[in-house]
Image (cartoon, rainbow, N blue to C red):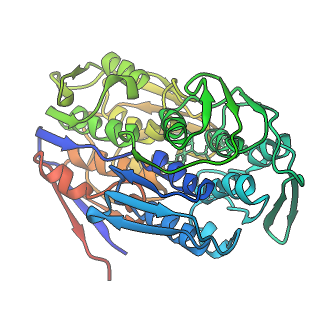
Amino acid sequence: MDSILVTGNGPLSGDIPIAGAKNACLTLMPATLLSEEPLTLTNAPRLSDIRTMTVLLQSLGAEVTALQDGKVLAMSSHGLTTQRADYDIVRKMRASILVLGPLLARFGHAEVSLPGGCAIGARPVDLHLKAMEALGAEMDLRDGYVHAKAPAGGLRGGIIEFPFASVGATENALLAATLAKGTTEIRNAAREPEIVDLAQCLRKMGAQIEGEGSSTITIQGVERLGGATHRVVTDRIELGTYMLAPAVCGGEVTCLGGTISLVESFCEKLDAAGISVEETEKGLTVARRTDRVKAVNVTTEPFPGFPTDLQAQMMALLCTADGSSVLEEKIFENRFMHAPELTRMGARIDVHGGTATVHGVERLKGAPVMATDLRASVSLILAGLAAEGETVVSRVYHLDRGYENVEDKLSAVGAKIERIQGQ
Ligand code: EPZ
């Protein structure tokens, strides 16, 4: 397994390109299952999760061709051979459950392995299943698979009311409702930019959708969907992650293609910490002009609140803040696994359940640390960028799921970082 070696190397300066959003691409790709016509995605990120979704769609008989070094995905589902998504692929990535809605809507049945939990939590899919039932489907759970069956005439429009704004369940419901007969209303829908991006792509395919980005999305089902070409929205989590590099190290970095609208609540916290963010036509220019950032409190919430996917990275910044910060993780039940690793670098963090209190120290010290999940891994790299001495982050396969060429992007702005090939 590869590792990443980071050495504290002072202020950063330059531009970092931001890729297309992993979490948009992972819900856009299953949309190809809804139509016989080709669906082409541009600005796709080159990530292992995208390759996993590619293998899953190909296992169903879809054609997925990566062009332009993987930045373009040309897909077609005119010749699907099965509606069964096998455990050996689904277990690798939770987002695999997003093939359920499209398969059920277009073919009237689907067998999808339950994804299982992951490091950050149990992550059940009960809301996905309830959404399909609200559209008339029968869901039978047996031998680790969801056996879903639509009514004889196909899915029927209905009211889907979520107890909380689940991103994936909203995406599955939206995908399925495009072909359900009649009107579907999704209440307490998630409002993430990735859902807005999905709705815009489905609309290009002929879907009739209103209200995406708000808490209520209304869909008029159509007979069939056509093809489309769609550009994947900029990755707001990669954007926020790299905005923290100059915040942690000092200096000034422009994240190309970034806009405030993608990371508004995150920018409010950076401002409170004393970090300046300016939107230009190139992207977001971030600078730290003080010796130490100020302590700030953070609570993760569904969009437009502070993103849970930036909590670990923000914690890395606050480890050296002037004062104590309280971070509340409200979305996942176990998303502080980066805390003990940061503590190995000299951070002072008290974790009690879903709350972590970070007492800022002057400077962290490099140490060997271990990545436990995707966002924790990049949090450790951020901490290593400003720490005294060398930090070696192991198990970086987690990192490669969600960040393309981290070492190249950070080296280009002056960071001392390299990948060590695993034994
Ligand atoms: C999406 O996961 C993202 N993944 C996650 O990003 C992100 O952290 C999360 O949304 C929240 O923003 C993708 O888009 C591929 P949820 P998802 O359904 O859809 C519980 C990353 O780092 N829940 O909003 O799984 C669930 O256990 C990843 O890129 C149920 O209880 O998130 C969690 O505690 C990590 N039942 C909470 O809701 C359900 O049926 C939020 O889950 C579904 C979810």
**Relative to 89, is 181 on the left or the right?**
right
> Which x, y percent locates residue 280?
18, 23
Quarter of the image for the N terminus: give it. bottom left
The foreground one among 396 and 210 is: 210
> Would you identify the image quadrant in which residue 285 lies?
top left
Of the pair 38 and 319, the residue shown nearer to us: 38
Q: Is residue 75 left or right of residue 400?
A: right
Question: How far across and how far down the image is residue 172, in percent?
Answer: 67, 46
Q: Is residue 200 above or below residue 379?
A: above
Q: Nearer the viewer, residue 208 or 265?
A: 208
Residue at figure coordinates x 31%, y 17% from the top left? 271
The picture places residue 101, in percent across and down from the top left corner, at 70, 51
Q: Give percent across and percent down for residue 270.
A: 33, 23
Q: Quadrant of residue 12?
A: top left
Q: Quadrant of the C terminus?
A: bottom left
Q: Residue at x 35, y 43 (%)?
A: 238
Q: Quadrant of ligand 1?
A: top right
- State the residue in front, 36 or 348: 36
